[in-house]
Amino acid sequence: MVNSKEYMKEYYLTNKDKYKANSKTYRQTYKGIRSNRIQNWKHIGIIIDDYHNYYDTVYFPATHCQICNVEFCKESKKPTSKELDHDHQIKDRPNIVGIVCL
């Protein structure tokens, strides 16, 4: 009888390069980027009724900061990259702002 834990470990070690390549490729797709962004929102405590719908209809199409109206850049962690401004106490719908306006 094969120990399933040992088998899975061996299987993973044999195929880990394939898993890493597939994971890296997926993270660069629209669905992968969306999934990662939503996971981050949940991790920091942002509560939205329908995360996928909010991402698709509000966050992704946003092109300008809702506070200063500066156009967002495509690169992350730049002063004009897109982020969510939110309040944990009010649980209000988050604003989409540039990092400078946080």
Image (cartoon, rainbow, N blue to C red):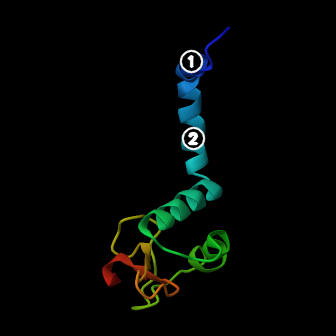
| In this rendering, position of residue 33 left or right of residue 85 | right
Amino acid type at image mark 1:
Thr
Please state the horizontal and vertical placement of residue 81, each as a whole percent of the image. 41, 72
- Which of the numbered marks, if any, corresponds to residue 14? 1
Question: How much space separates mark 2 and mark 1, taking CA atoms?
Answer: 16 Å
Tell which circle, 2 or 1, labels the residue nearer the N-terminal end: 1
73 and 35: which is toward the camera: 35
Amino acid type at image mark 2:
Ser
Quadrant of the frame with the C terminus: bottom left
100 and 87: which is toward the camera: 87
Please state the horizontal and vertical placement of residue 40, each as a whole percent of the image. 47, 62
In this rendering, the answer to whether 94 lies above or below 16 is below
| In this rendering, position of residue 19 left or right of residue 84 | right
Judging from the image, what secondary structure is the residue with disc 1 in?
A: helix
Residue at image position (65%, 72%) is 56
Residue at image position (44%, 72%) is 73
Few, some or many C-alpha atoms within 10 Å of disc 2 (few <14, some 14-19, many ≥20)?
Answer: few
Residue at image position (54%, 21%) is 9
75 and 94: which is toward the camera: 94
Please state the horizontal and vertical placement of residue 51, each as a whole percent of the image. 61, 71
- Which of the numbered marks, if any, corresponds to residue 23? 2
